[in-house]
Amino acid sequence: MCPVDNMWFTHSSLGLLWILQQQLGSGSITSIKCQPVTEQVLPKDYERYDAPLEDGQPSIVQTEMAFLTLKSVDPETMTYETDIFLSHIWREPRLCDVSFSSINRTLEPKFFEELWRPDTYFYNAHSGTVQEILTKNQYSKLWSNKTIFFNARISLKLTCDMVLRNYPHDTQTCAIILKSLSYTDKELKLVWKRMDVSSQIVLPQHDVIKTETKEEQDSYGFGNFTRLTGIIHLKRRTGYFVIHTYIPSFLVVIMSMISFWLPPESAPARVALSVTSLLTLVTQQAKSSIPSISYVMAIDVWMLGCIAFVFATLVEYAFVSFTLQRKRKNTKGYTTKVNPGQSPSGRNQLAFETTKQPELKEIPNIDDRIVVANRIDRVSSFLFPSAFLIYIFGYLAHYLW
């Protein structure tokens, strides 16, 4: 650019600035003064604590819930934790007619505080908070047809009444309950629009089977209140328990039955095997992460059954040991006494007196007792595993099939 062009551009810019200053001073160009949204939308007699009744009908509040996470489903405390997006949609016919440049307008938090909003709360919440990472995770929008949309991300710890009789083969139904605190069904009516559970949710011990929603009503002395209930069905996965409980206890019971194939005379080996198996099962049950529940659960039935079979093997060897050492009575034995005396002829001679009486007679040969003990072990080696298999099938039929 040549020097002449530079001088022309500079003088042109200065001239435009001088013209703008003259026009502003003369009032031909006025500055734009925007009214606050509150003054545009809210009437002077607006009451933020009164529900927006339309033609005498209660305000309809549509509710959406989107579950982002599910975690810490704890049967010990009977609670679960979740992160959700909660949305409320309702009409506010008392607002002034205002046309927006777009379909909706995001409201400032201060302005939203001036509007009426549903006073909903989570009935079964143990604790909860609106997340504030980087910024507070909530916002509201106003449509030109006077519809208000409110959305917030909330972290909740909720109670879940669990029935653990079939634990760990149980299916639980955990609920999330939303109610109005002060508005009766004549002022506010909560309705479901949608409830979604993210398909990306992965729980360590549960699978989400299905979800369902209910619209119910609670009656109190001062009125009826609507209640929204969202139900999540959770099926417990048994892989952890199969690896850490069922397979080890099964192998311990089978190990205790190996004593039937040991010689009856091997008392130290058979007693040590049975006692060690029994102590292993008792220790396993004591250290397992089983909920502290007063009633009997499925896993308790399994462990008590295994303990009973191991204890029975110990009792069986006690009976075998008794067989090896027992004595028996021979009720058909005879004894003969020799008494010195005189015959009728006066000669001295021995008088023989035979009496019939029972006497203790030992089994003639130790081999006979071993044969009896081996026969008991042989029957037990078939009877005990068969009874254990029947017990397993009965357990599976009752709790799984």
Image (cartoon, rainbow, N blue to C red):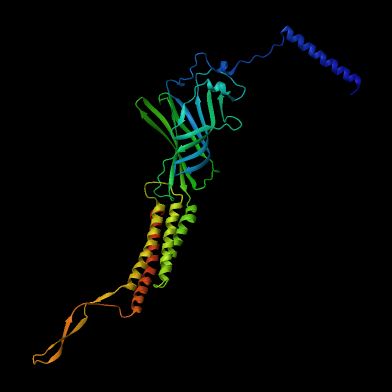
In the rendered image, residue 197, in percent from the top left (x then y), is placed at 51, 40
- Quadrant in which the N terminus is drawn: top right
Where does residue 353 sit, x and y in percent of width and height?
16, 84
Left or right of 289: which side holds 379?
Answer: left
Residue at the spot 44% in from the left edge and 55% down from the top edge: 283
In this view, 87 is above or below 284: above
The answer to which of 298 and 331 lies nearer the viewer is 331
Q: Position of residue 354 (x, y in %)?
A: 17, 84
Residue 101, image x, y percentages: 62, 22
- The image quarter in which residue 56 lies: top left
Instruction: Mark yes or no: residue 393 visible.
Output: no
**Is residue 327 or residue 374 the one in the foreground?**
327
Screen quadrant of the C terminus = bottom left
Q: Nearer the viewer, residue 215 or 359?
A: 359
Closest to the observer: 81 or 311?
A: 311
Left or right of residue 18, residue 391 in this image:
left
Q: Is residue 359 visible?
A: yes
In the picture as drawn, the residue positioned furthest to the top comes out as 26
**Count of numbered marks:** 0
Q: Quadrant of residue 372?
A: bottom left
